[in-house]
Each structure stands twice: as C-alpha cells, then as structure tokens.
Amino acid sequence: MRRTQALWLIWVLFLLTGCALPARQVVLQPPARDVLSSEELPESLVHLSIYWNNHLIYLNGEPVEPDPIRQLLDEMRIVSPGSIPKFSHQRRYLVYAKVAATKILLWDLDTNTREWLVEAGRNLPPGVKISDYAFMPDDDKVIFAYGWEGRNPDWDLALVDIETGEVESLNIGGFISDFGQLNVSPDGKWAATDMVTLDSRVCLLVNLEMRRVECLNIEKGWYNDVKFLPDLEHIVYVHKREILSPNTVMLSRLDGTENRVLVSGFVHAAIFTVSSTRV
C-alpha cells in the first residue's frame, strides 16, 4: 500500500495517528468517520501540512517542497528527532532544540539567517536544560520551558523576545512536570502542557496573565496533546487512565464546568490540529 493510501486508513476524523490495530478492530465510542481519500477532506484542510514519517507533507498526501524541517535535521545530522522543529504562525521562523538541549536555534526563512535564540550560560543560567517551546500569537516571542535536572523545584517557563533576545522568566516553577508539549491560546493568555501534578490534582493550564498553574476537575491518568479551540473557552486533549489503557479524546471548558468525551477506543492517539468544528 502506498504511503498516501496508508495515511487515509488511519485518518479517523480527529486526525489521530499511531493505531497498532486495524481501524475495524478498534471499538470507538461514539463511532468516528474514516477519511479514506483526499476528496473527503474539507477544503480548509487539504493544504494543511503535518510532520509525518520524518517528512513534511500536506494532508492530501503530497510532499511539501522544499521541506525546511527535513533540511534542518539533515544538516544537523538528526535522523529521527525526539523533538520536532516548530514553525511560527506566519511560517517565517523555524525554531528547534534537541531533547534536553541547552539552546534553541532560530531560523529566519525570509532572510535565511540562523542564530541561537537562547543559550545556557549566555541569556539563560548555566547548566539548564530546555524541554519544549512554542510561538506566542504575534510571532514576536517564543515561550519555552527550562530547568535543572534532578533539582526540585526544578522547572520554569520563560519568554524570549525574537528581536532583542531578552529573556523573561515567568516564575511558575516547582511542579513535577517539565512543561512538555507547550501550546499557547490564540489570545496569548493561556499556555497548555502535558500533565502537571499539584496536590494530587490534574493541572494542564498555565494562566500567563496571573502566572500560575490552573487545575481541572478531571480524573488522574496520562494526558498529552493539549490544544486550544478558537473560541478561547475550550481545550481538547488525549487521555488514558493507565499506561496501557485505550486513548480517549476529550473536551473541557477552561473554567472547569464541562468535561466531555469526543471519541474513545484508540490504541494510540495524537491530535494534529483543531478548528471551531473539527479536531
């Protein structure tokens, strides 16, 4: 089967990937619609690009050419990255840091110039490691997590100004998580991360205005791929009760008044993108 055909077979409405079982053997509640060809994609998603099998491709199966992510990884001699380079919202910039890196690379695709945006010992304290990073809505700053391995409290969030290189720590450290898989709300008021444990509660949100972690009234387990909906009132995420439990895609209100299952039963799941009507 060609790679493009295989893509559609595991494209199950919510753009979930990684199923270890054929789709017909997975019990989904509620039933989800398989997207089996590019003709079934909404027009708004046809030219959406995702990182797939170590390459950047459009959801219609065509490769993105040129592929700056692959170019950067090839030049850095990285075959399969643990951390994937991220585009800015307007796709002018590309940032990348290796897993447990001490610096973040910024590539300006318009001018084809590269520089170390942040670096331990220069505009970060010596010895820190970087966990994850994301662009703020205006593409003028990058938010990232950094910390000292083995120290408790050990992790914090910081903002770096792309133009000046000035770093501002947010002083939100002291939690078990390393703030992995950072995502920022469209208005820049919230950041989302994988699970942060605080007093045995599940805390997925960081209020960037109040500079504190917010917790939701949801059950314990494993959480990842937390993303904001455009309405600025909801998040979606993947949850499983135990490490080997089926994956559930859930929706919650930021104010904690709603927790709802969208679809469940996947062996593995990851959320690529969200819109006002589709995940």
Image (cartoon, helix red, strand yellow):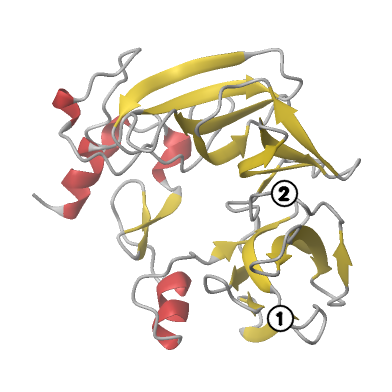
Q: Residue 107 or 19: which is nearer the viewer? A: 19
Q: Which residue does the image show at 60% across and 76% down from the upper left?
A: 109
**Residue 44 drawn at (x, y percent):** 48, 37
Query: In whole angstroms, how far apart are the C-alphas of marks 1 and 2?
Result: 19 Å
**Residue 105 drawn at (x, y percent):** 63, 78
- Mark 2 residue element: loop
Taking 134 as reference, is 71 left or right?
Answer: left
- Mark 1 residue element: loop
Check the image and report above or below for 116 versus 12. Answer: below
* Label at residue 175: 2
Say which amino acid is labelled 1. Gly
**Residue 257 drawn at (x, y percent):** 71, 12
Residue 241, quarter of the rendered image: top left
Q: Residues within 10 Å of mark 1 (few under 14, many from 20)?
A: few
Q: Check disc 1 and report the residue beneath it.
A: 127
For this orientation, the residue located farthest to the right is 210
Residue 215, quarter of the rendered image: top right
**Residue 232 drawn at (x, y percent):** 73, 29
Taking 46 as reference, is 97 left or right?
Answer: right
Q: Which residue does the image show at 50% across and 32% down from the upper left?
A: 221
Check the image and report above or below for 125 versus 222. Answer: below
